[in-house]
Amino acid sequence: MTKKEHRLGVHEVNLVIRHLKLDEPATEAVEAAISEIDQLFGMDGVSFDDKSYVINLAYDASHIGIGQIEGILAKYSLDISHDWWTELKEGYYRFVDQNIKDNAKHEPWSCHKTPPGQ
């Protein structure tokens, strides 16, 4: 079993892959947004399919959330498609990203630990 090399800050256990469909954008705005998204700490890869207007993302969800990516897209006046499937996926992505972020901060608890001070 080979271990894939990831960018700095990306742990495979927290790696998620996302696909967001955009409304028909201007290519200059997409290139600028992708360039900025690609620089985020925890981003493993980003690409754009200009035929289907889908942005493909791979990132560590303990560092980045879908909200940050949506913020960058909004900065460049790029809208995520408002069809029901994309909105459903977007809500699911938001839930899973927050769950991964919360679990990464959580300190495991065990009733078998000795009490502090003993």
Image: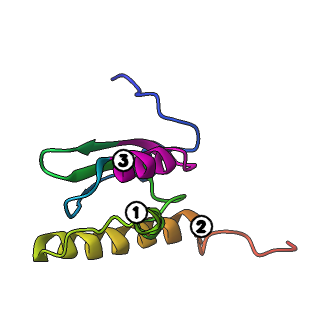
Q: Quadrant of residue 98?
A: bottom left
x, y (%) of residue 61?
A: 45, 58
| Residue at 12% over, 71% down | 85
Quick check: 15 left or right of 106?
left
Q: Badges 1 and 3: C-beta atoms under 8 Å apart?
A: no
Taking the spot 62% from the left edge, 68% from the top edge, the residue there is 107
Q: Image height check: is 96 above or below 12?
A: below
Give the left or right position of residue 21, taking residue 35 as reference.
Answer: left
First-in-chain label (1 vs 2)? 1
**N-term mark: 2 or 3:** 3
Q: How is the image coloured?
A: rainbow
Q: Secondary structure at mark 1?
A: helix
Mark 2 vs mark 3, CA separation in Å? 38 Å
For the magenta stretch, what is the residue range?
Answer: 28-46
Nearer-the-camera pick, 12 or 35: 35
Q: Amino acid at mark 2?
A: Lys
Q: Secondary structure at mark 3?
A: helix
Q: Which residue is mark 1?
A: 73
Picture residue at 43% right of the left edge, 52% below the top: 33
Mark 3 surroundings within 10 Å by alpha-carbon count, few (fewer than 14), some (14 through 19), many (20 or more): few
84 horizontally vs 70: left or right: left
Quadrant placement of the C terminus: bottom right
In the rendered view, would you say 86 is above or below 43? Answer: below
Which residue matches tag 3? 28
Q: Please, what is the three-letter code of the amino acid marked with disc 3? A: Glu
